Image (spheres, rainbow, N blue to C red):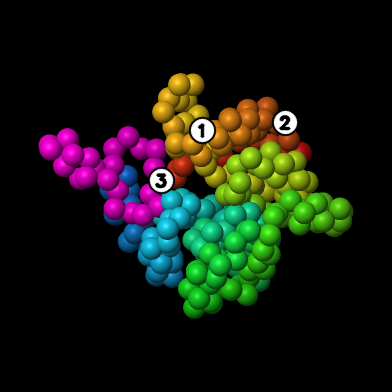
Amino acid sequence: MADQNQSEAGRHQEVGHKSLLQSDALYQYILDTSVYPREPEPMKELREITAKHPWNIMTTSADEGQFLNMLLKLINAKNTMEIGVYTGYSLLATALALPEDGKILAMDINKENYELGLPVIQKAGVAHKITFKEGPALPVLDELVKDEKNHGSYDFIFVDADKDNYLNYHRRLIDLVKVGGVIGYDNTLWNGSVVAPPDAPLRKYVRYYRDFVLELNKALAVDPRIEICMLPVGDGVTLCRRIS
């Protein structure tokens, strides 16, 4: 019973929690000290709406949302893209960080989830920055790549979508992001499973996508067109800065 109580007490209260920190208390400290007190009201509202959704594990964690918001300001991003939107928590973090005339091309196969968060995004006064496209992203990216004027036109691109297509996305996004611009790939430590032994008991979907994540990580590490930084924020995020 003591063990059960301990595990109950150790669980994060956030729904959609993703942290690779070994200590739940330490992660809670980060949230309580520097994330929640500074979280904009619309983001808190959207996080609470998302918490009630059955797929809430798909959401971006609050600390990662804060990180993205600051990163976008640091690089003075204006023209951005997001592949994989869900209810729009990271999208809202981006929209709030961009200047009034900033733009986000947002893509997801499920418009219903996006529409769950849309009223909050509208209320925050940033919906005009977003162009949402429902459906697979690859055909949209192929169209963008065809037109030379789109090459090097994006300051920042965030990918949190189907892991089995991450490398396909990368092949296209590298042309679309500007030299000095940043692509962020989410979930690159994939539940910590990237270091799990072959016979480790993993959930089916974790095991299935792990090989794609490992393949992506290997490819990014040797891509001479980018500098990379892999961060243990959320479920692991790899930042790629295009250098050529």
Q: Which percent across, then down, holds residue 182?
A: 64, 47
Label 3: few (<14), some (14–19) or many (≥20) C-alpha neighbours in 10 Å: many
Q: Amino acid at mark 3?
A: Lys
Q: Which of the two discs, 2 and 3, sits closer to the camera? A: 3
Above or below 232: residue 31? below
Residue reaching furthest front? Answer: 204
The residues tagged by marks 2 and 1 sit, at their Cα atoms, a distance apart of 29 Å
Residues marked 2 and 3 touching at CB (< 8 Å):
no
Q: Quadrant of the C terminus?
A: top right
Q: Which residue is mark 3?
A: 18
Q: Secondary structure at mark 1?
A: helix
Left or right: residue 95 versus residue 199 is: right
Q: State which region is magenta.
A: 1-24
Q: Amino acid at mark 1?
A: Arg
In the image, residue 133 lies in the stretch drawn in magenta: no
Labelled disc at residue 207: 1
